[in-house]
Amino acid sequence: MAAPNTATQTDLARRYENFAAIPTTEHVMCSVNSSEPAAVYAEGPSPRIMTTFWAFTILGPGTSGDGNSCRQYMQRVGDALGSCQECVTNWHRYRTAFLSKAAE
């Protein structure tokens, strides 16, 4: 059996740590309660949105991440998408472009 790709595992762990570091008081897909200026979102996806999308590739439905991390991710994104129209708008606005880029 081949050894796991350590660089990839390290990158995935770093991406999840970046997501986990977003304060829970901030929305993950918009500027509510964020130190990021709202104008950042008019220019394209903010670093926080990209972090949330990368975490989705690791922890979203159908992935094999650790169960607790998956639940925390799904709860946090679900809360944002269920209570904030701006988060929903940004999720749909940037998702397709992100998925295309991630597939490269």
Image (tube, helix red, strand yellow):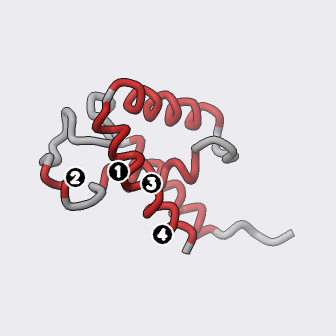
* Residue 60 in picture, x, y percent from top left: 58, 43
Where residue 101 appears, as percent x and y from the top left, is 48, 69
Give the class, few, some or many, for how many residues have Cα within 10 Å of label 3's Cα (few <14, many ≥20). Answer: some
Q: Amino acid at mark 2?
A: Tyr
Instruction: Residue at 19% x, 55% y: name it.
Output: 42
Q: Which of the two labelled residues, at mark 2 and mark 3, occupies the earlier sequence position? A: 2
Judging depth in this view, the residue of 46 and 67 nearest the camera is 46
Res 2 quadrant in image: bottom right
**Mark 4 vs mark 3: which is more N-terminal?**
3
Q: Which residue position holds label 2?
A: 41
Indicate left or right for 72 with 61 as reference.
left
In the image, which is nearer the foreground, mark 1 or mark 3? 3
> Which residue does the numbered mark 4 point to in the structure image?
101
Q: Residue at x 19, y 33 (%)?
A: 33
Instruction: Tell me, for residue 49, which label it has, or none.
Output: 1
* Contact, mark 2 vs mark 1 (Cβ under 8 Å): yes
Please name the amino acid that badge 3 sits on. Arg
Q: Mark 1 vs mark 3: which is more N-terminal?
A: 1
Q: For this view, does 60 lie left or right of residue 87?
A: right
| Cα distance in 3D space between marks 1 and 4 | 14 Å
Residue position for label 3? 95
The crowding category of the residue bearing disc 4, from other C-alpha atoms within 10 Å (few below 14, some 14 to 19, many at least 20), is few
Q: Which residue appears at 41% of the width and 48% of the height?
A: 92
| Disc on the earlier residue, 1 or 4 | 1
